[in-house]
Image: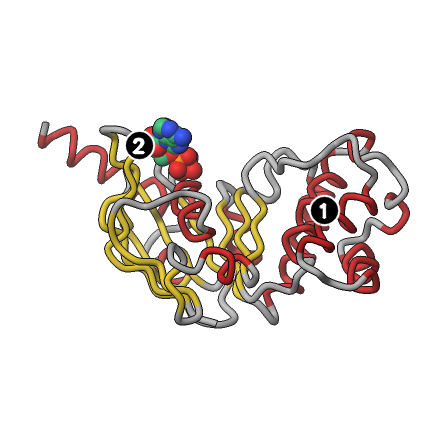
Amino acid sequence: MSLQITGLTKKYGSQTALHNISLTIGKNEIIGLLGPNGAGKSTLMKSITGVLNIEDGAIVFNGLNVAEHETESKKNIGFLPENNPLYTEMYVKEYLTFVGNLHKISAQRVDEVIELVGITPEKGKKIAQLSKGYKQRVGLAQAILHSPDLLILDEPTNGLDPNQILEIRNVIKEIGKEKTVILSTHIMQEVEALCTRVVLIHQGNILQDSPVDEFRGKFESLEEAFAHYTTAHSDTSEAAN
Ligand code: ADP
């Protein structure tokens, strides 16, 4: 698996959300995509999955340009979008079987994934009846059902309680042993616990791209490093204005 992003620019009307981003990601990495709200993380994730059309640049996944080979690329990418959109009137197993049918995967695989994400006792329930943590697991299940090489998770633990966070993290860690994962998060403990590499985005630019230890560098903590890079950058641009 490989992902090469070169010169990616994405605009919303007159606003440029991503400026000329380049990034190469190899196999078996868990990448923490960091950045303040509005930095461009979700836009980058949606661009990689082919959900958004990009203005400039190229995203090449496993040798195929995503924009030109959207369906083929999506077969090998799993995506858990921000706020985990689900068909809440469906039952858990019914929903995952529906998603499985779209990917033409076996009923056995649906059961395997239900077991893997720990929702076997919930599989007969309506999604609307589930706690937020279990809904998140259903979202994760739909993202990994087709065994994609690349898994993209937009704030996968947002809004969960501490126990649920640990449980979802363990699932992601297991998946990360075999697959490449890009996840966005504001929780630095999550980066410490899961990620091998940090990509820090600010105002649509990549400010840092390094192994977690290198990102922490001379700072006491990842939070301090994050604050330094993001506020130092804002100060500079404010001074420039
Ligand atoms: P993040 O995920 O880092 O919080 P986003 O990628 O959601 O950042 O947003 C980056 C910028 O693009 C923000 O200024 C946001 O307001 C803007 N943006 C995101 N989605 C849209 C959209 N559909 N239409 C217009 N502007 C958008």
Image mark for residue 12: 2
Q: Nearer the viewer, residue 154 or 170?
A: 154
Q: Badge 2: how crowded within 10 Å, few (<14), some, or many (20+)? A: few
- Residue type, mark 1 in image: Arg
Name which of mark 1 and mark 2 comes first in the sequence: 2
Q: Does 171 appear above or below 224?
A: below
**Label 2 lies in ligand 1 vicinity (Cβ under 8 Å):** yes
Q: Nearer the viewer, residue 134 or 53?
A: 53
**Element type at marker 2?**
strand
Q: Give coordinates of residue 184: x percent, y percent.
A: 48, 46
In this rendering, which labeled residue sits more in front, label 1 or label 2?
A: 2
Q: Would residue 116 appear left or right of 121 to someone viewing this image?
A: left
Q: For the point 30% across and 58% down, which residue is it?
A: 58
Q: Give coordinates of residue 113: x percent, y percent.
A: 76, 59
Q: Do we see residue 38 in this rendering?
A: no
Q: Check disc 1 and report the residue beneath it.
A: 137
Q: Give the total of numbered labels.
A: 2
**Element type at marker 1?**
helix
| Quadrant the C terminus occupies | top left
Q: Would residue 203 appear left or right of 220 to someone viewing this image?
A: left
